[in-house]
């Protein structure tokens, strides 16, 4: 198992290197002169040259990359052009709302989706199964921001149960935190939930037709145990796969949801940076999101090995 984990970790090195190169080239190979774009149309030549020197754009591309990687290895993601604050500090200041939204969405989606998908797969063709399929279609069809505004109208403007926008840290109390994070979590979690539920349903439905399920039933094993210990357990790998793949959906959704609900997180930070053309911040956030996605997929791969020892070889 240890050899498998080390092998997977070493396999991430070229992936991280490629991601770093792509993120680095986003600024250097974008159309036009980045210094001119950042300075604005009315900037003079001295201002443009100062920005070019600050970003290191006056040096050869190879030298720029070596310097950038060296800074990256020391945890330096650069400095914001407009706020003059280190990008690492900016990300850390905004990390709590984003991490809270991502974690609550994961818990909300998984806790609801897996039981629903399991029941639907075990009772294929039932009313619950058909409702799940209908909700799945709606969940994939409705854009996240449209769903967010609908939930705001119902729960905030009409029922007055939850706040329209903003974020309350858990340090200020559990109830204010849950109140502020409930609508964003439901909005972002619906698309993720139906994705996991559909894959869970399909996997469990496939397992229910296998020989070992018929053998368990023939031995008199209770149906609940047949479904949970046999069908669901053997469906774990496809479910883990879709959870890992869905992290990309989660990351992109965070950017939209934080804008809709005015949450001061990393997603909102990157939106503001794009509007201001603050390239160091954009690079730092993209690199952070990419690293999180790679790390979660590593965890999923390791989980495969625990669930199915054949994966180790």
Image (spheres, helix red, strand yellow):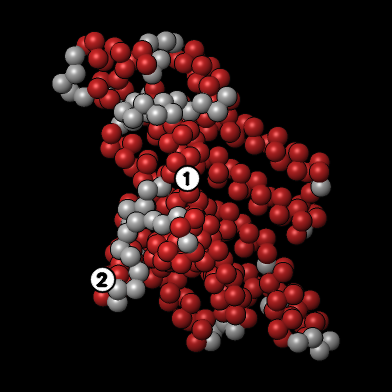
- Provide the secondary structure element on which disc 2 rests: helix
The residue depicted at 81 percent of the width and 41 percent of the height is 3
In this rendering, the answer to whether 295 lies above or below 198 is above
| Distance from Cα at disc 2 to Cα at disc 1 | 28 Å
In this rendering, the answer to whether 44 lies above or below 211 is above
Q: In the image, residue 102 lies at what x, y percent?
A: 49, 55
Q: Toward which corner of the image does residue 53 lie, by quadrant? A: top left
- Provide the secondary structure element on which disc 1 rests: helix
The residue depicted at 37 percent of the width and 16 percent of the height is 54
Q: How many marks?
A: 2
Q: In the image, residue 313 lies at what x, y percent?
A: 81, 47
Q: In the image, residue 250 lies at what x, y percent?
A: 47, 54
Q: Nearer the viewer, residue 307 or 163?
A: 163
In the rendered structure, find residue 157 and report the number of the disc placed on it.
2
Question: Is residue 185 found left or right of 313 in the rendered image?
Answer: left
Q: Toward which corner of the image does residue 124 lie, by quadrant? A: bottom right
Mark 1, Cα crowd under 10 Å, few <14 / some 14-19 / many 20+, is some
In the rendered structure, find residue 191 and report the number of the disc placed on it.
none
Residue pointed to by mark 1: 95
């Amino acid at each position: 198992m240890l050899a498998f984990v080390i092998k997977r970790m070493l396999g991430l090195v070229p992936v991280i290197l490629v991601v770093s190169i792509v993120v680095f080239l986003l600024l250097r190979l974008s159309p036009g002169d980045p210094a001119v774009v950042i300075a604005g149309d009315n900037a003079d030549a001295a201002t443009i040259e100062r920005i070019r020197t600050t970003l290191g754009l006056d040096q050869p591309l190879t030298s720029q990359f070596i310097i950038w990687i060296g800074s990256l290895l020391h945890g330096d993601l650069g400095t914001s052009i407009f706020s003059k604050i280190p990008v690492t500090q900016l990300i850390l200041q905004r990390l709590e709302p984003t991490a809270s939204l991502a974690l609550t969405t994961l818990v909300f989606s998984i806790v609801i989706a897996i039981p629903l998908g399991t029941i639907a797969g075990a009772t294929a063709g039932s009313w619950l199964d058909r409702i799940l399929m209908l909700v799945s279609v709606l969940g994939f069809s409705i854009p996240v921001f449209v769903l967010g505004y609908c939930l705001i109208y119902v729960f905030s403007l009409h029922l007055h149960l939850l706040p329209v926008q903003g974020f309350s840290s858990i340090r200020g109390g559990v109830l204010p935190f849950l109140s502020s994070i409930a609508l964003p979590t439901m909005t972002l979690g619906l698309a993720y939930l139906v994705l996991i539920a559909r894959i869970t349903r399909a996997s469990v439905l496939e397992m229910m037709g296998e020989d070992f399920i018929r053998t368990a039933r023939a031995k008199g094993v209770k149906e609940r145990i047949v479904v949970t210990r046999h069908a669901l357990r053997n469906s774990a790998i496809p479910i883990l796969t879709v959870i890992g793949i869905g992290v990309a959906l989660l990351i992109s959704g965070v950017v939209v949801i934080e804008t809709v609900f005015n949450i001061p997180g990393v997603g909102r930070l990157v939106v503001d940076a794009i509007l201001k053309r603050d390239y160091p911040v954009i690079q730092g956030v993209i690199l952070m999101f990419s690293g999180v996605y790679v790390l979660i997929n590593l965890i999923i791969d390791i989980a495969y090995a625990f669930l199915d020892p054949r994966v180790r070889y």
